Image: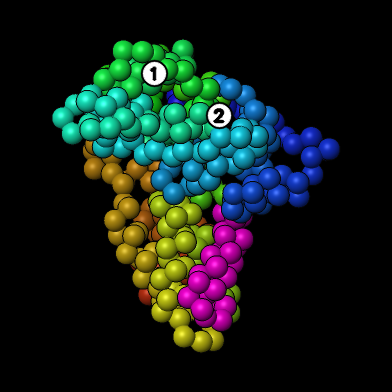
Amino acid sequence: MDNANLIQFTKPHESEPISKLQNVGALTGIITNNQEMLFIFQYVGSVATSKQPILITGETGVGKELVARLIHKLSLNRGELVTVNVAGLDDNVFSDSLFGHAKGAFTGADKKRRGLIEKADGGTLFLDEIGNLSLPSQVKLLRLLQEGEYMPLGQDELKHTNARIITATNMDLWSLQKAGHFRNDLNFRIRTHHINIPPLRERKDDIPLLLNHFVEKTAQELNKKKPTLPKELIPLLETYSFPGNIRELQAIVYDAISRHSSGILSLDTFNQHIEGERKNITTYDETGANTLVRFSTELPTIKHATQLLVNEALKRAKGNNAIASKMLGISRQALSKRLKNRSSV
């Protein structure tokens, strides 16, 4: 079991009203009314002033960097927040970028270079995509975390830092550790405090808030009047799994507003995107069976299974036949026919 499931968030105290927690998130542009996210804000507030490392996990596009910025703001550290994406960096580039180098350390090093860890002194160093860090670089990061020490390239004298270190990843570090791609000691060290951000499909109550925010922001950016949203839009979005999470929603909205001219915002862009993505998302296990479906010991008849599928689609679409038919991959007329036949039985 992933240790992320062991993280517990306590319910906010009565002295900490929801509006206050929402305002905390608003410091960095986090928009939510989701209870689990509000629990996370409370946890963030309790560990923000700690000097220990924080690991932020979650799928791509959930807002891990926004949470890191929130932690930095609440930490009251006077130094800068320095962000480094370590994906694709070999050990030499990582060491040079993070720790800097002395003049003459290697060919082309004609002057001293200040490392990003020095720039973050008194502040926060945020290392994104930590799951992609090479093993040699992991050793150096571990020393930095344990001793607060590092050595610039070409220099034989240790330097010290008091920068707070936050890491983030969309990968399962426990699986990487078992495969020998991530150090056991580093994995435990970076997660003294651990924040796991839920995907958008698990916080669908935030979709109306986020949608309205992105529509308003995009219309303003493109110098357009904010369009009227069709009533079918939110039910449609709530049926989608959003593999790209909040970032994906923002991109769809931007594309839709870019195409919009006047009146009610068209559903075409949203429908096209969702239908296109659904064709690519079907998941299969090793036997080739669809892992999104589970059967009991006794198989249902084709007729019964079809009824169950139609019922579930209508439930997810909140009774909207047009949306349900798209989910089922059939025409609206075909769905109406099935419903008519069901009611006549």
Residue pictured at 30% horizontal, 26% vertical: 101
Is residue 230 or residue 79 the one in the foreground? 79
Instruction: State the count of labels.
Output: 2
Residue 21 seen in the current view: yes
Q: Position of residue 12 (x, y in %)?
A: 74, 36
* Label 1 sits on residue: 150
Upstream in sequence: badge 1 or badge 2? 2
Is residue 329 or residue 233 the one in the foreground? 233
Question: Quadrant location of residue 325?
Answer: bottom left
Amino acid carrying mark 1 in the image: Tyr
Read off the magenta span: 204-227
Would you say 269 lies left or right of 26 here? left
Would you say 47 lies left or right of 220 here? right
Question: Quadrant location of residue 122?
Answer: top right
Amino acid carrying mark 2 in the image: Gly
Residue pictured at 26% horizontal, 27% vertical: 103
Residue 43 seen in the current view: no
Does 281 sit above or below residue 190?
below
* Label 2 sits on residue: 122
Q: In the rendered structure, are the residues bearing label 1 and label 2 in contact, judged by CB atoms less than 8 Å apart?
A: no
Badge 1 marks a residue whose secondary structure is: strand
Q: Position of residue 302 (x, y in %)?
A: 36, 56
The quadrant the N terminus occupies is top left
